[in-house]
Amino acid sequence: MDKVQKVLVTGGAGFIGSHFVKRILQAGDVTHVTVLDALTYAGHIENLGEAFLSPKLRFVHGNVIDGDLVDQLVSEHTAIVHFAAESHVDRSFFAAGTFLTTNVLGTQTLADAAMRHGIQRFVHVSTDEVYGPLLEGSATEDDPVRPTVPYAASKAASDLVALSYFHTYGMPVCVTRSSNNYGPYQHPEKIIPLFVTRLLRGEPVTLHGRGQHVRNWLHVEDNCSAIELVLRGGAPGEIYNIGGGTDLSGRDLTSELLRICDASWDSVTYIPDRPSNDLRYSMDWTKIADHLGYQPTHDFATGLVETAAWYRRNPDRWAPLSRNPHAPLPAVRATAARPERDHVH
């Protein structure tokens, strides 16, 4: 595997990015890590926490569409891991231009600088949503992208931009596409932290449709381990799907969270489905398992309990986003019962 030495991590104060930064700082061959983050609503410098104890870490507050800043930073590094993106589906309905600017133009700005300065490794982090809905079967890396919402379209476009720099210029870029991540530090707009933080306060939660939408759930640490494998050993120009092995419908996920948070189905209201809410995502991740030895190691039931416990212990991180930050929180159970899997395909 290649030594990565000096790594630029864009979006490194976000949920997945901050977990990756903490991981890569522990690598003996990494001498320097720079985080570039715009600290928008979903990026929090607190996510990096103990990472600031490392003399290897430098933080730069800035945007990936700032060409001069990006060029300067890229010139100082040997590898790039590109997390920076607008990533919330619902927000993309009302701010598609922001998503296209950050996700597509930001990737192109970064790729231009990487090409000029001869970056040795470039990992572009993407999502399973680019494949669009699959009623049956699983998408492989060779399948076409068929996004249905502005967020997914912006990520599919940024994937193609990144890969075009390999085909046109020979730049050593790889693309990772992961399923739904969960774990500590995630912004409460995403379904797991949103439901946990509301249920811990005795507040209601809402499910779209009848909760029939199926997603694959991947612990953030498993995703970061896979991204590091791609950074070190991925073949330039290749795409790698990263899955977690646990498929759940929204209803089944809610059942898990109700048990963990000692809440009942009386807390759940069904609301009309949102536009283009894809019924099912599914990816085949045989390629990264066979070529790079990836296997997820986090049990979903245990990981979900641990995630809920983190939100229970850290209300100061999410309570400011809620109406009543001083409400008492009930205890989180130490174990999670498995739901019936009626809705899993």
Image (spheres, rainbow, N blue to C red):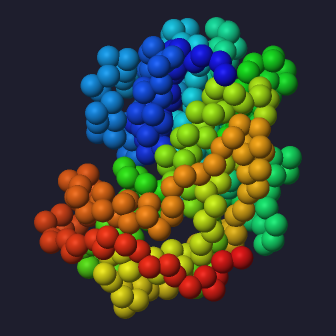
> Which residue is rendered at x = 48% and y = 29% of the image?
24
> Against 101, is 327 above or below?
below
Foreground: 198 or 26?
26
Q: Who's the residue at 49% across and 46% down the image?
A: 221
Q: Which quarter of the figure has residue 303?
A: bottom left
Does 200 sit left or right of 57 as displayed?
Answer: left
Q: Nearer the viewer, residue 100 or 64?
A: 64
The residue depicted at 63 percent of the width and 68 percent of the height is 247
Q: Position of residue 128 (x, y in %)?
A: 68, 53
Q: Is residue 170 left or right of residue 89?
A: right
Residue 145 x %, y %: 80, 51
Give residue 262's position: percent from left, percent from top.
31, 81
Q: Nearer the viewer, residue 324 or 120?
A: 120
| Residue 203 on image: x %, y % | 29, 78
Left or right: residue 87 versus residue 315 is right
Residue at 31% in and 67% down: 197
Identity of the residue furthest to the bottom in this view: 266
Q: Is residue 330 visible?
A: yes
Whether 31 is drawn above or below 130: the answer is: above
In the displayed structure, 156 sits above or below 110; it is below
Question: With 66 as the anchor, is 175 left or right in this view?
Answer: right
- In which quadrant of the rendered view does residue 112 lie? top right
Screen quadrant of the N terminus: top right
Query: Which of the pair 237/205 is nearer the observer?
Result: 237
